[in-house]
Image (cartoon, rainbow, N blue to C red):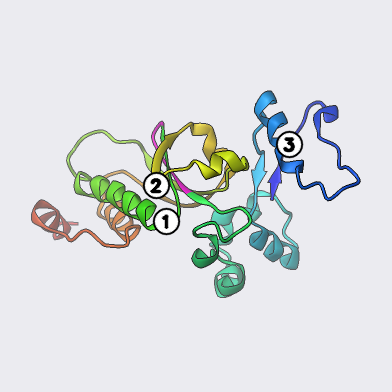
């Protein structure tokens, strides 16, 4: 569910007396020309949960990270939570990609085995140099992103750098602080499918925290 705010309502494409199969295409051309971005994004499953619980759609309480703190939502995640099998490989109407925001850089990974390997490799690299003493961005944020433009979606590779505006189309699903603490390090390790073992200086450091 996307919310777009138009200063000029006349720019909104009309709903025609047909099946409106081309509506998204007509809408995207206006959004691109006028540089209009979503002012709110909510997964439909999250919206269904909010509807049942009386939570206002597109409010701060409806944000995915806020819902993850909701006991009822966690208990009913089999109904409302992220379904990895459905959103992979284009099986959903709006197949999502994983966008990772790291400082001023945003990387987009598709939901394929190749994309998973590239994402794991990126996280592994961050983990291996986590305690190297070099200055890093304050946090690492992960977004489930559904680019509206079908042509753009079709051209997405396993990994590519994209404009920072891409995260405006996404839902933040996880974030990790990059301050070099053991807690942040373990959280970063747990984001990978194959955890990086504590070895060498890292294993020594873990005994002193």
Which residue is painted at 49% across and 50% down in the image? 97
* Viewer-proximal residue among 119 and 42: 119
Image disc number at residue 112? 1
Q: Position of residue 49 (x, y in %)?
A: 68, 65
Residue 102 is one of the magenta-drawn residues: yes
> Residue 173 — which label?
none
Q: Is residue 68 left or right of residue 5?
A: left
Give the labeled residue for mark 2: 158
**Foreground residue among 24 and 67:** 24
Q: Label 1 near label 2: C-beta < 8 Å?
A: yes
Q: N-terminal of the two: label 2 or label 1?
A: 1
Disc count in the image?
Answer: 3
What separation in Å lies between label 1 and label 3 (alpha carbons)? 28 Å
Q: Main secondary structure of the magenta part?
A: strand
How far, Cα to Cα, is label 2 from label 1?
A: 7 Å
Label located before the other in sequence (1 or 3): 3
The Cα–Cα distance between marks 3 and 2, rounded to whole angstroms, is 27 Å
Residue assigned mark 3: 27
Secondary structure under the numbered disc 3 in the rendered image:
helix
In the figure, 148 relative to 117: above or below? above
Residue drawn at the location 41% of the way across and 31% of the way down = 104
Q: Secondary structure at mark 1?
A: loop
Q: Is residue 40 magenta?
A: no
Q: Are marks 3 and 2 in contact (CB under 8 Å)?
A: no
Give the residue drawn at x 68%, y 35%.
28
Q: Quick one: label 2, few (<14), some, or many (20+) residues within 10 Å? A: some
**Chain part drawn in magenta:** 98-104
Determine whether 6 is above or below 141 in the image.
above
């Amino acid at each position: 569910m996307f919310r777009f705010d138009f200063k000029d309502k006349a720019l909104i494409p009309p709903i025609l007396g047909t099946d409106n199969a081309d509506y998204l295409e007509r809408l995207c051309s206006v959004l691109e020309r006028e540089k209009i971005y979503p002012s709110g994004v909510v997964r439909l499953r999250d919206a269904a949960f909010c509807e049942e619980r009386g939570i206002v759609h597109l409010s701060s309480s409806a944000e995915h990270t806020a819902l993850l703190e909701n006991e009822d939502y966690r208990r009913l995640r089999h109904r409302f939570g992220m379904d990895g099998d459905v959103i992979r490989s284009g099986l959903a109407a709006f197949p999502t990609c994983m966008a990772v925001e790291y400082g001023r850089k945003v990387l987009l990974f598709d939901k394929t085995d190749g994309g998973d390997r590239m994402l794991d490799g990126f996280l592994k690299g961050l983990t291996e140099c986590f305690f190297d003493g070099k200055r890093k961005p304050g946090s690492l944020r992960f977004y489930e992103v559904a680019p509206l433009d079908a042509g753009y979606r079709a051209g997405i590779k396993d990994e590519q750098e994209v404009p920072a505006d891409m995260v405006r189309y996404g839902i933040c699903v996880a974030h990790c602080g990059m301050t070099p603490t053991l807690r942040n390090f373990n959280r970063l390790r747990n984001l990978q499918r194959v955890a990086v073992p504590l070895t060498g200086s890292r294993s020594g450091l873990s005994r002193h925290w």
